[in-house]
Amino acid sequence: MKRPLFFSLLCLLTFGAHAAEAEKPLRALLVTGGCCHNYRFQTEALTNAVSKFAKVEWTIVNEGGRGTQAEIALYGKPDWAAGYDVVVHNECFADTANPEYIRRITEAHKAGVPAVVIHCAMHTYRAAQIDDWREFLGVTSRRHDHQSRYTVKRVEAEHPILEGMPEQWVTPMDELYVIEKVWPGAQTLATAVSEVDGKAHPVVWTHQYGKARVFGTTFGHGDDTFRDPVFLTFVSRGLLWAAGRL
Ligand SMILES: [Zn+2]
């Protein structure tokens, strides 16, 4: 009689511990700001959307003004990402090129801090001679096509991040980023075709950078994209995947 009771209690305790672990909020850092986009609105839309999927304690860093060049105080310390389960990069500073500054960011990720990279993050540090940031992103892009409503094709339809995405999703008016290179470790999940040259470009992908998972999308220019439930769902799921919760 005693053993089954003991094991039942043990199971109950184990289950309880797992439940507590699952409910532990994710600690997420969102770095945003810079040129060309409505980051206040995007931040509100994104954090609201993710809250429907998981409990998240957000730290928002919106610094550097609205220009294309800034070095923000956050990255001043090598351990700037300590304590976060995931970092979301939704910033836009194409003309910042300082290699030491950029490597303080990428080294933290390479050591294991997961990341989500959105839209202009792909053109951030575009002026840099070093490739570290682009290797971290998983893609190299230096320009984008005009705004249009792009049809998105799933190429890894079974990937859990894409669950709920229609077979062909048409974006709100958004920019198509021209992808020059997909880095080793990156896997394209969805593409869209350029109306300029007919080439299919990755628009959603996963990446392994050092010890960290990275999830990326080049969409996210305008407010309407951040109102689109398909976009908000795959970005939320991408964040969970990067953090090891999907
Ligand atoms: Zn844009």
Image: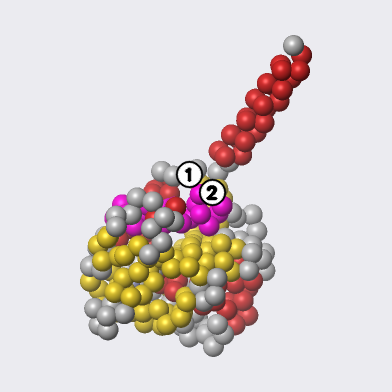
- Category of crowding for the residue at label 2, using alpha-carbon neighbours closer than 10 angstroms: few (below 14), some (14–19), many (at least 20): few
Tell me which image quadrant ligand 1 sits in: bottom left
Q: Do we see residue 192 in this rendering?
A: yes
State the extent of the magenta-drawn residues as a range: 227-246
Q: Quadrant of residue 87?
A: bottom right
Which disc number belongs to residue 245?
A: 2
Q: Do we see residue 31 in this rendering?
A: no
Along the viewing direction, whichever of 91 and 172 lies nearer the viewer: 172
Colour logic: secondary structure
Decide whether residue 241 is among the magenta residues.
Answer: yes
View extreme (right): residue:
2
| Residue at x 57%, y 79% (from the top left corner) | 132
| Residue at x 24%, y 78% (from the top left corner) | 195
Q: Quadrant of residue 25?
A: top right
- Per the picture, the main secondary structure of the magenta-coloured stretch is helix
Mark 2 sits near ligand 1, with its Cβ under 8 Å away: no
Q: Where is the N terminus found, in terms of image quarters?
A: top right
Eyeballing the image, is 72 above or below 244? below
x%, y% of residue 109? 61, 66
For disc 1, the marked residue is 54
Amino acid carrying label 2: it is Arg
x%, y% of residue 170? 25, 62
Labels 1 and 2 touching (C-beta < 8 A): yes
